[in-house]
Amino acid sequence: MRKIIEEFGIFAVAFLAILVIMKLFKGNIDMISYSNITLIFALSLINIAFRHWLNTAKDKYSMSARNFDFIRRMTMIGIIAVYFYFKQ
């Protein structure tokens, strides 16, 4: 759990740094709303947690790296699809 929190913290700091840089060069970043920022943070936390869970499953069931990436990416696409389906 600590590793998940550390990776999410690194992501959060990097993301905020990118937003500050965008603000400096572009001036106004109204295209990014608070709901979009929250969605990005939530999806990144889910992705990090799911990746760690799959790492334990990968070691336990001798899953190949290709299957690992495929399952992780398809799950994230599914989560995003469900979000946009219910958002409408």
Image: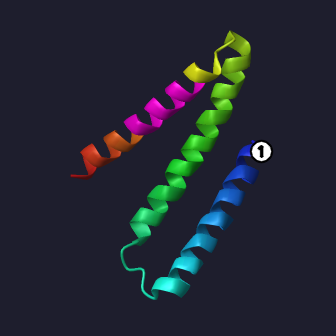
The structure residue drawn at horizontal position 63% and vertical position 73%, both measured from the top left corner, is 17
Q: Give the image location of residue 57, x and y in percent.
A: 66, 19
Q: Nearer the viewer, residue 20 or 12?
A: 20
Count all numbered tags in the image, as a single digit. Answer: 1
Q: As displayed, is residue 33 above or below residue 58?
A: below
Amino acid tagged 1: Lys
Residue furthest right in the image:
2
Q: Give the image location of residue 82, x and y in percent.
A: 33, 40
* Element under disc 1: helix
On screen, residue 1 versus residue 64, left or right, reads right
What kind of secondary structure does the magenta stretch mostly adopt?
Answer: helix
On screen, residue 36 versus residue 71, left or right, reads left
Residue that mark 1 sits on: 3
Residue furthest left in the image:
88
Where's the N terminus, which quadrant?
A: top right
The structure residue drawn at horizontal position 78% and vertical position 46%, both measured from the top left corner, is 2
Q: Give the image location of residue 5, x and y in percent.
A: 72, 51
Q: Which residues are magenta?
A: 68-78
Q: As displayed, is residue 77 above or below residue 23?
A: above
Q: As displayed, is residue 18 above or below residue 48?
A: below
